[in-house]
Amino acid sequence: MLAKVRKTIGAFRMLGPGERVLVGVSGGADSVALLAALHRLAPALGVTLSAAHFNHGTRAGESDRDESFVRRLCGSLGIGLLTGSMATDKRRAGLSLEDFLRRKRYAFFESARRQAGADRIALGHHRGDQAETVLLHLIRGSGLSGLAGIPPVRDGGRIIRPLINCSPGEIIAYCRREGLSFVTDSSNADERFLRNRIRRVLLPDLERRFNPAIVDSLCRLADVVRQEDDYMREEARAALETLASGPSTSVIPIDKLDALHPAIKRRIIREIVRGFAGPDAAVGLDHVQAVLELAAGEGPSGTRDLPGGTRARRVYGRLEFQSGAGRGGTAREGAPLTFCQAVPIPGTVGVEMLGLRVRFRELRRPPSRPETTPRRAYLDLERIDGPLVLRSPRPGDRIQPLGMKGTRKLSRLLIDEKVPRDRRSRIPVLADDLSVLWVPGLRLSERARVTGGTRRVLKAEII
């Protein structure tokens, strides 16, 4: 196993002479074998080791037992150990228990790396973990990125996995040969967790009934996909730089996104969500597709909840991505807004705080079918009284909905249309001196309707 570990380190350029390596040690066979192997190879590699252990505190006495074991192990090897434990605040912010614990663990490892002055964090993932991860992502409906599995090197080389080409059998055999003891995590047998069911039920069944070398096949698939995924990721990141509205990638103009190839669009969404939720967030194809459907919808607004407490919001012509810790776009969500802008004809009006741009122009001749959509309206210019403005709703606003004889309070219309209270001040209205003429996405006024006798037509369109 040592030769395979050293070959993997060289193939992926994981370590260089003079570097400091922090080894994540849970006390299980994988991390014990990793620590022992790197301890054996350290003089030849020219690296210095330290270790870190995170006590999740989720398994009563077992968690403390594991920490005590790791302390004794590191002491016997003369390796310095940093430990951490779960904070008293265990609110998960919409995360599954597995995702929550993983994020806490990785955050601790990064903090310990800085404290130890280490260049790398070495973790004990192996070929079995790789095969499980590929199947896990496939079951969850992942795209191509999920099939790439666990990367041998991540975050620019800060996280390395020297055992990624070793099988569980090789690791256990190494521990026995070297006389290394280890602890067993009882939660690994809990089949309520999907990963455990894959390891204990699905993979053995696939090996027995379909392909005895299924682990090798899945790992080979991950290797091929990872190379292609790396290329596509770079393409997506380059495209994202041209898309971002302003200095942040949290705001994306929908028209620019629509112009891209579907494969690049999917990757851009995944990159953005992982930027908020963390690189280990389980962003599946269903999540990506939900965001793309939000962008493609006819409605001017909407939201989608995503992994890691992230939320995507459509605000007319753009998508806003917000973290669970502090959701916000150019304007704080839920904050009342007041705006009013005169409408030039022809011309374009932009409401920056909403990411909204509306283009106005008079048509040379009336359209044969002046159909109003959520993003486009046709109005009879000669029935407009006074200057046109695009503004926020005001108390007392009224509209005569298309097809009706009387008027209605705009506030009642927004309630009936189930517009959330904190969104009502953010709904733009097109109005003249008399009343509201168009509420984009909701209603056109009967008073401004284009008829067979209309001579001058104004086209208003969200762009």
Image (tube, grey):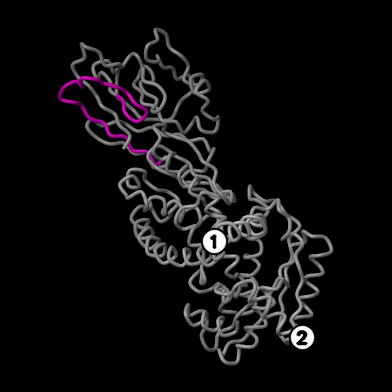
Name the amino acid, label 1: Asn
Residue extending farthest to the bottom is 43
On screen, residue 54 versus residue 359, left or right, reads right
Q: Which mark is residue 211?
A: 1
Look at the image and say whether residue 370 sits in the magenta stretch.
yes
Q: Position of residue 139 (x, y in %)?
A: 55, 50
What residue did someone put label 2 on? 76
Q: Does the magenta segment cover residue 443? A: no
Q: Is residue 79 above or below residue 244?
A: below
Residue displayed at 73% across by 72% down: 27
Task: State which quadrant residue 175 falls in.
Answer: bottom right
* The magenta segment: 355-377
Of all residues, the one furthest to the top in this rendering is 405
Mark 1, residues whose alpha carbon is within 10 Å: few (<14), some, or many (≥20)? some
Q: How many marks?
A: 2
Name the element at disc 2.
helix
Depth check, front residue: 318 or 271: 271
- Residue 358 on image: x %, y %: 32, 34
* Residue farthest toward the front in the current orientation of the protein: 209
Q: Which quadrant does the C terminus fall into? A: top left
Q: Secondary structure at mark 1?
A: loop
Decide which of 26, 356 is in the foreground and name it.
26
Identity, as a three-letter code, of the amino acid under mark 2: Ser
Earlier sequence position, callout 1 versus callout 2: 2
Residue 338: where, in percent of width, then height? 45, 34
Residue 99 appears in the figure? no
Say whether residue 170 is visible.
Answer: yes
State the image quarter where residue 67 is shown.
Answer: bottom right
Numbered badge on residue 367: none
Q: CA distance from mark 1 to mark 2?
A: 42 Å
